[in-house]
Amino acid sequence: TASVAAPARAGTRTAAGGATDRATGAAGVSAPGAVGAPDRGNLTVGAAKAGALLDRQLTLARTRAHSTALQALGSSRFHGIADKVAVLASEVPLTPAAADTDLRPLAEAARERLVDAVAALPLLTAGSPYNAAALIHGLSPDPSPHPQDAPWHQVRLLLRLHRYAREVLHATTGQAPPADTRLLGAGEALDRHRDASEAAGAAAQAARTPRIAPATAYALGVLHADQRHEVEAARYAFQRCWQKEAIGMP
């Protein structure tokens, strides 16, 4: 929960200003005169209330996660795991042949898992930024998470695993791994994807709060749409990075 709340808060804070600008801008399209001013004021207040609501909910989620973590750290199960880890650390290397073990097959396995996971992604759909086709489901009122978010999150984890494997493999030779700007760019795009996805989920969850004002709900809807657009932009950026060249052996 903590890992979800922290990035979501960062994303929603970044997008809160955008929601305010969009809300106040939306009022500008109304007819000039006395009617436009109240609308602009209501939308501005709604955006402010939406930001305050998100801040309260994310603070509550962070507090609950902190309490849960403290309870886990004080449990007998955690202390048992810590003891086992300490014993394992004192017995390294685990086998006499550990120093001579060839790590290249393990690194290759990590690379293959990443390649297979990326192959399952709809990269053709992600071939254009802010595409409307992908947003049809992303902007739906369905309270369940977007079905395509989880595979992208999994690719993000596998990409990190691949990078760690390259670092370990080169550490055995005493040399730093060669810089790979393509992997770095792909990782940054997937980090943006994760933040925007969780920010959109937080906005959608806040919009389901009972008895909120229409202007507040509107501002949350604008924020949700804005973050789903950022999701698609991050997927497009990843697709552009990935298609530059195939991943080779470290």
Image (cartoon, helix red, strand yellow):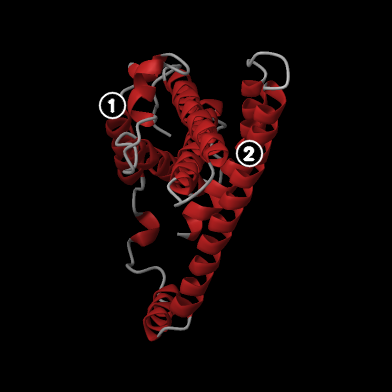
Foreground residue among 81 and 238: 238
Number of marks in the image? 2
Q: Where is residue 212 in the image (x, y as percent from the top left)?
A: 51, 48
Residue 135 figure quarter: top left
Neighbour tally class for label 2: few under 14, some 14-19, many 20 plus, Cα within 10 Å: many
Q: Which disc number belongs to residue 192? A: none
Vertical order, 183 against 1 (above or below): above
Which residue is drawn at the image coordinates 54% and 28% (left, top)?
A: 185
Foreground residue among 21 and 238: 21
Looking at the image, residue 201 sits to the left or right of residue 52; the answer is: left
Residue 181 figure quarter: top right
Q: Position of residue 98 (x, y in %)?
A: 36, 61
The amino acid beneath tag 2 is: Ala
**The residue positioned farthest toward the bottom in the image shown:** 76
Looking at the image, residue 133 sits to the left or right of residue 167; the answer is: left
Give the mark nearest the N terminus, 1 or 2: 2
State the SS at label 2: helix
Foreground residue among 209 and 56: 209
Q: Which disc number belongs to residue 119? A: 1
Q: For the residues marked 1 and 2, what is the alpha-carbon distance in whole angstroms?
A: 40 Å
Q: Which disc number belongs to residue 47? A: 2
